[in-house]
Amino acid sequence: MRRFVRSADKVGRTEIDIKGDTALVMNKPERFRYELIDAIAKDSKRLMDAMALDCKVQIDGLNSRVQWERASAAELLLYIPYRMTISECRSGAR
């Protein structure tokens, strides 16, 4: 095991420690804020297109901190908790 740890490629800030449990850490998740906001905006537009509606979309919570959680043994899920409110809808595609 020690030979594997010494020979393993370590990308970025990767650390390998054979003691303890497996853990993933995210340093400075805020650097992904605008990528997440862009994905949220695209999702809201796609939702309106899928429903063929012209609506007012209000998104609250984008000022919240970027959060993360472990999605699998090797993946982290980044997100901004937000709430989307859809109102004033009219039929017909935009």
Image (cartoon, grey):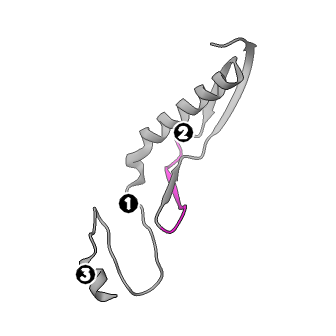
Secondary structure at numbered mark 2: loop
Query: Crowding at label 1, few (<14), some or many (≥20) Cα neighbours within 10 Å?
Result: few
- Find residue 10 and report its image quarter: bottom left
Q: In this view, does 74 lie to the left or right of 14?
A: right
- Say which amino acid is labelled 3: Arg
Q: Which of marks 1 and 2 is nearer the N terminus?
A: 1
Q: What segment is highlighted magenta in the picture?
A: 63-73
Amino acid of disc 2: Leu
Residue nearest the viewer, comparing 14 with 86: 14
Location of the C terminus (image quadrant): top right
Residue 2 falls inside the magenta stretch: no
Give the residue at the far left of this rendering. Answer: 7
Q: What mark, if any, has residue 6 been given in the picture? A: 3
Q: Which mark is residue 27?
A: 1
Q: Is the magenta stretch mostly helix, strand or loop?
A: loop
Residue 92 picture location, percent across and down = 71, 11
Inspect the magenta stretch and tell me whether residue 72 lies in it.
yes
- First in sequence: mark 3 vs mark 2: 3
Quarter of image, res 60: top right
Q: Residue 59: image x %, image y %?
A: 61, 32
Nearer mark to the viewer, of 1 and 2: 1
What residue would you read off at disc 2? Answer: 62
The residue at the point 64 percent across, 22 percent down is: 49
